[in-house]
Image (spheres, helix red, strand yellow):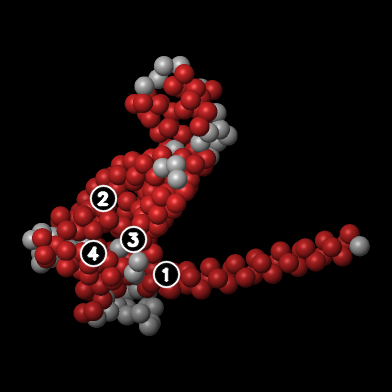
Amino acid sequence: MAKAMQAREGSRWRGSNVYLIVVFAILYAPIFYLMLYSFNSGGSMHDFQGFTLEWYKEVFADTRLFIIVLNTLVIALLSSALSTILGVFGALAIQQVRRHRHRNALLALNNVLIVSPDVIIGASFLILFTMIGIKLGFVSVLLAHLAFSVPIVVIMVLPKLEEMSPTWIDAARDLGASRLDVLTKVVLPYIRPGIFAGFFMALTYSLDDFAVTFFVTGNGYSTLAVEIYSRARQGISLSINALSTLIFLFTIVLVIGYYFINKRGNRPPGTEVQR
């Protein structure tokens, strides 16, 4: 009987592993195909003739592309930092709401920009900026990225706030801590993993966003996603493969960094206090 159960569990485990392998193969096969042909000396996506770094050299030699990379990084880092600050205070404000109906209403409003189609968000911001006279460019892209990044940070931070025991705050106040001390020495250290998670998620979304950014960029200003789309429309060039490979590797580095930060932060409650 025991052997039969073990055999059944083993077959189920193998079946689930095969299913996961197939799913990940389908998801990652196009990416690896793109990365492979970024080293193709043949100049096409159909016949791999030999290994070369020519397309990467072309990417690094492109001055205009370097400026676009700087634009993308500045927008991503600045919008992520600002959205993290706004998102933390937004999560704190939602967490302080006592009535469940009002809290659920605020969460629903927060989630609207997450579940709404990017095309609708981008078109809405384009109409808004045109009506109020904001010139399309750096400012318009930054405001649009803030709009969809702040709700992400709220979603990442709020569970950590809900997880924190209220007795910690009561104990700090009983010991004479001010509101600022409670925030900086009790609340923020505890929710730090959620803050880092929100920052990295906002950074990743900002780097990868195309639809919203496409609507709010003006003449003379562009980001990597919009630039890749524009080049792809002009025809197949393996420099696009090389550029996409570099972006993918950079994203992998961000994910690994988030993983280790989150791993360090997931410690039993009270560890920071004992220190």
In whole angstroms, how far apart are the C-alphas of marks 4 and 2? 13 Å
Classify residue 4 as left or right of residue 190.
right
Q: Which of pointers 2 and 3 lies earlier in the amino acid sequence? A: 2
Q: Nearer the viewer, residue 254 or 33?
A: 254
Q: Residue at x 26, y 45 (%)?
A: 82
Q: Quadrant of the N terminus?
A: bottom right
In whole angstroms, how far apart are the C-alphas of marks 3 and 1? 28 Å
Q: Residue at x 22, y 70 (%)?
A: 123
Q: Which type of secondary structure does the marked residue at label 4 adopt?
A: helix
Q: Residue at x 40, y 20 (%)?
A: 177
Residue 59 in percent (x, y) is at 23, 64
Residue 18 in percent (x, y) is at 64, 70
Q: Which of pointers 3 and 4 lies earlier in the amino acid sequence? A: 3
Q: Which type of secondary structure does the marked residue at label 3 adopt?
A: helix
Q: Which of pointers 4 and 2 lies earlier in the amino acid sequence? A: 2
Quarter of the image for residue 244 reads bottom left
Q: Which type of secondary structure does the marked residue at label 2 adopt?
A: helix
In whole angstroms, how far apart are the C-alphas of marks 1 and 4? 23 Å
Q: Residues within 10 Å of mark 2 (few under 14, many from 20)?
A: many
Classify residue 193 as left or right of residue 242.
right
Q: Amino acid at mark 1?
A: Ile
Residue tagged 1: 31
**On screen, residue 196 above or below 24:** above
Classify residue 39 as left or right of residue 100.
left
**Residue mark closest to the camera, 1 vs 4:** 4
Residue tagged 4: 213
**On screen, residue 42 above or below 138:** below
Residue tagged 2: 79
Q: Nearer the viewer, residue 147 or 93?
A: 93
Q: Residues within 10 Å of mark 3 (few under 14, many from 20)?
A: some
**Residue mark closest to the camera, 3 vs 4:** 3
Residue tagged 3: 113
